[in-house]
Image (cartoon, coloured by chain):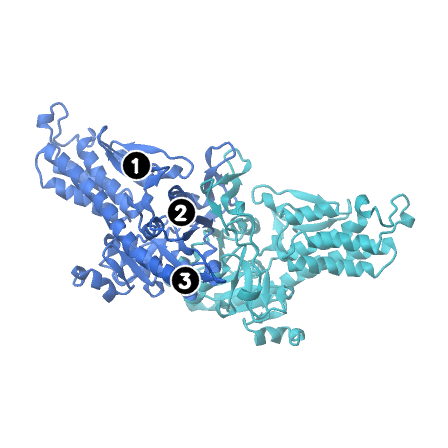
Chain colours: A cyan, B blue
Amino acid sequence: MKVDGKEMRPIWFDLKSQTVKVIDQRLLPHQLIVAELKTVDSVIEAIKKMFVRGAPLIGATGAFGVYNAIAYPNYANCGGYEYSDSDSDTKKISDKYLKDECKRIKDARPTAVNLAWGVDRVLNAALKYEKYEDRLKIALQEACAIVEEEADNCRLIGEYGYQLIKAINQNKELKLVEGKNRRINILTHCNAGWLATIEYGTATAPIYTAFDRGIDIHVWVDETRPLNQGSRLTAWELGKHGIPHTVITDNAGGHLMQHGMVDIVIVGTDRTTRTGDVANKIGTYLKALAAYDNGVPFYVALPSSTFDWSLTDGVKQIPIEERDPDEIRYVQGLDKKGNLISVLVPPEDSNAANHAFDVTPARLITGFITERGVCNAYEESILSLFPEYANI
Amino acid sequence: MKVDGKEMRPIWFDLKSQTVKVIDQRLLPHQLIVAELKTVDSVIEAIKKMFVRGAPLIGATGAFGVYNAIAYPNYANCGGYEYSDSDSDTKKISDKYLKDECKRIKDARPTAVNLAWGVDRVLNAALKYEKYEDRLKIALQEACAIVEEEADNCRLIGEYGYQLIKAINQNKELKLVEGKNRRINILTHCNAGWLATIEYGTATAPIYTAFDRGIDIHVWVDETRPLNQGSRLTAWELGKHGIPHTVITDNAGGHLMQHGMVDIVIVGTDRTTRTGDVANKIGTYLKALAAYDNGVPFYVALPSSTFDWSLTDGVKQIPIEERDPDEIRYVQGLDKKGNLISVLVPPEDSNAANHAFDVTPARLITGFITERGVCNAYEESILSLFPEYANI
């Protein structure tokens, strides 16, 4: 997507240096820093320390980690295995080394389903070949394919979601306020934008598409405590693309919906059951309750890879990650001198609890926007788009 | 209430200096600073800049402002009126001067119902007398009476609310988790504590009373964006009293309730209709929706002065104050050197909207805890406690 007029993605393979590069998202919106990931360790660090976040991007970064394991093998980790750096013709890495390195990458964030998926896909592709050069080539190909597929899924989500926004825009009654046309107001929570998903984003894909096709829209951006992915990342993305937006507290959505100031809510998801329960950033459930209470359509945008076809009850079956309480206690921002620092908000000796996600029951969700189209939030409707999962 | 073992209130009349003193709450929890308010202007500044906040405390501060107008009259404002500073026997201030000064105080926060009420009560008491010394004396008496009445109301709210918590505590089924007794978990939003209401607080009064009487409780403290009154003030109050508590994001309450980790929600209110709709800090509505969805009792604690008997529809009739967007964009906290500073979170050029309150419809509220007892959230039940307002 566009950043100051220049096309940019959160991850790309730099042909010149033959390395993968990512935006270090921890410093956004105040600093746009690009990090080069030249080893498996640097990939693990980027995932653990959240240079990169968002399920699809974590998966893609992990995929490039497998490439790094081959292209820039760790001599120490290769110690016991066959490996020679001296002569590229005889270069060889063992299956065991490669599998061990992949396990280390997958352990960087064990709850991220896409990470294991991305790593295993590249690993399995590479293991089909024996020769070092073949493995190197196929790993790069496969990682790049994952990136392009994710981008394409999001483009399709944008297409289908655009139809929903267009329909609201064409509903003259909804659009009229005191006889005058008004903007379509879209509310989103967290960052399910291109920073999390290569291109377009999931929740933001319909927004970008609608804006680019000339619909007059405005986005309410939940700041999304504790890590403020909304006010830091979504606001930055939308601003760089020129889309009118307003940052609000996570507390404000209900009030806005009560007063007719939200036409549609679109959020992303980290994991979705086959019955339509949605795990997403903490607070999504509260916004869904408010949307339901006020008759505001509540949509979840997702590539189908986010469905966990083995689950039928989100609240009972999806484990919720508890993260470091200091993410709540300290807030990062720019001081007056322009330095990025963290400040302590509550009393030094007060504890905090940091449940990172919650589950929104399917009954509160109007529908899903997927790369295959829009469906309702119950099993039969979901399976009508994904019939191949009916008997799993 | 206790602060490091010493009894403290957020406002008091200092006999030695004959001035009103307040805690400058903007600096809590990191600095406990006391401000002396020796003029009408200093009272207005303390209200406008939120040295003091919370409906009862704002009312009490305004009440002392009337005393200040008499005790420390502004020579400039008295210019056109009868006033002599030279000889205390002939000291006199005109009704017009006093009324004008009261209007200035009331304009400091026009939406605060208690402010106008407190100021007018002292003004009307003073106007009954002619002599300067009488006016001075009665103004001080009336302001102090307001303070003691507020404290007494909160003590009674604590008594009635305690009965609710005691009942939960005695319900063995609720208290058992895997065969073991567990703490009673109470969730609160914002700061409806003694810092806002002289003593005990409103929402916190049942908490202090239950804790002091030996019930094993734990409080989930919503941080309460944008101004973080929960993580800054409620956490500080509870900590200073030794009550176990955990700060959570405003997004977390729904998840906790889904998983049985909240036994009762108690919040305060800034304005309540005779039909039971509750205006309170933004985000209260979202927590009420979650409590309703999960069968968690949701109580609002209030002195009856907070009822606005003229209103019947909260969402339609209660105007919602929009405050400075910079309250969202900047977050205040301690830097590493221990300095209290503000940091900018979203992009410099992103707008923010700061709706300060929302309205929770009566249908989501289990009941009210008042100084006269507990009632349900509908007109007949409320009027059963306050029959004198039946025909207003």
Q: CA distance from mark 1 to mark 3?
A: 35 Å
Q: Quick check: A16 left or right of A25?
A: right
Q: Quick check: A158 left or right of A284?
A: right
- State the image coordinates of residue A266 (x, y, percent, origin top left): 52, 61
Given the image, what chain letter belongs to the residue carrying mark 2?
Answer: B
Q: Earlier in the sequence, mark 2 or mark 3?
A: 2
> Crowding at label 1, few (<14), some or many (≥20) Cα neighbours within 10 Å?
many
Report which residue position mark 1 lands on. B22
The C terminus of chain B - image quarter: bottom left
Q: Is residue B50 above or below residue B161?
A: above
Residue B291: mark in rendering:
3
Residue A227 visible in the picture? yes
Which image quadrant is residue B79 in?
Answer: top left
- State the image coordinates of residue B192 (x, y, percent, origin top left): 34, 49
Q: Residue furthest front?
A: B179
Q: Amino acid at mark 1?
A: Val
Q: Quick check: A106 left or right of A160?
A: right
